[in-house]
Amino acid sequence: MHRHVRDGMTPPGRAQTIAVIGAGLAGLACAQQLQAAGHAVTVFDQAKTPGGRMRHYGAKQWQCDHGAQYFTARGPAFAAVVDAWIDAGIAAPWQARIASWDGAQLRRSQSVLTRYVGVPGMAAPARALAVQLDVRLCAQVRALQRRRTGWRLSVLQDAAEHLFDTVVLAVPAPSAAALLGQVAPALATIAEQVRMQPAWAVMAHFDAPIDPGYDALFVNAGPLRWVARNASKPARVGAETWLLHATAEWSQVHCDAQPGQVIASLVPELAALGLPMPQSCDAFFWEVASSDPALQLGCVWDAPLGLGMCGDWLAGGKVEGAWQSAMALARRVCAGDVPHSVCD
């Protein structure tokens, strides 16, 4: 049990007990900063592994990044973090041949933007952060209850009483809105402004390497929006596997389809993209793959309640935005007495 009395206006510098809900990059980065500031932090996530949408899936003979495909570093602060990840061997530049397809013509990308990936999988940076933290996996937070002594978390299939001074929500907007509706309606209203979009991901397996003249393709016609060769990324091993992401519109229409139906509908699209029929496929449905629109608030912090939100959906929708949002919220929490505000 975690217990610490809270008076609503925590003096800066006093150690707090803090619950972070969500073990994606935003939650883990925020937790790391709060722990480094001397707070006692516990991270809860309903998934079996950390990483959120920076997800990597592997089977006996193959592996594939089936969530976020890469990230960029446009700002100097995040660029420094990425450099540190590279030095630690958990990230690397992805020197991919990128192209686009409009339904009639293939065009090579002229962009000089550097794209990065986690190594040996996209989840590597998140997993490295998680090692340093108290992370409770397979721990779905069902409800928050405000008490005089702080916040009580109800965790599925866990009868223990979890009490904290402060709660940070680093989960998709719909999950945040559901948890906050009864206890912090003003914050819930902010989360309700964001519409999260789904995506079907198909992992197509082949018995030999394939080179259609590109490593990744932005698809601007038909039901697919992205195709990528996983083996083109650094440190990938296993059988030849390609990742297909369907458009948000197609995925929404087919949200109730079975994986086999999705595979049967999407795999025939590969012929027009210069790819053969795969030997086998797996499919996964991302209920919250992207945000439309992503907000530009940075983060949200209510000091009197001891309650905040961070995540990519509050800061542009990208991996870098998730990290920036986490840093912004950690600064607000550590300040201790900042009134209800959004932060950038």
Image (spheres, rainbow, N blue to C red):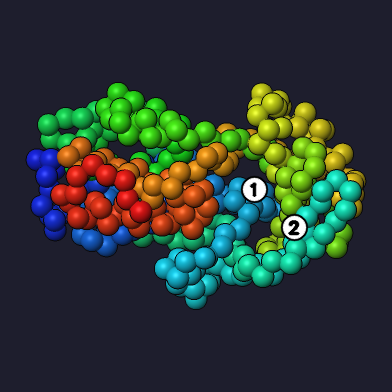
Please indicate whether residue 82 sits to the left or right of residue 163 in the image. right
State the residue position of label 1. Answer: 66
Q: Position of residue 310 (x, y in %)?
A: 38, 46
* In this rendering, the label closer to the viewer, 1 or 2: 2
In this view, 155 is above or below 312: above
Q: Position of residue 251 (x, y in %)?
A: 68, 32
The residue most toward the bottom is 87
Badge 2 amino acid: Ala
Q: Nearer the viewer, residue 130 or 105?
A: 105
- Name which residue lies at 38% across and 35% down: 190
Query: For the residue labelled by badge 1, is the local secondary structure a helix, a strand or a loop?
Result: loop
* First of labels 1, 2 by sequence position: 1
Q: Position of residue 68 (x, y in %)?
A: 59, 51
Please indicate whether residue 205 sits to the left or right of residue 111 in the image. right
* Mark 2 burial class by Cα count in 10 Å: few <14, some 14-19, many 20+: many
Labels 1 and 2 touching (C-beta < 8 A)? no
Please indicate whether residue 42 sits to the left or right of residue 216 in the image. left
Q: Nearer the viewer, residue 195 or 182?
A: 195
State the residue position of label 2. Answer: 216
Query: For the residue labelled by badge 2, is the local secondary structure a helix, a strand or a loop?
Result: strand
Q: Nearer the viewer, residue 232 or 127?
A: 232
- Name which residue lies at 27% across and 44% down: 341
* Label at residue 132: none
Where's the N terminus, which quadrant?
Answer: top left
Badge 1 amino acid: His
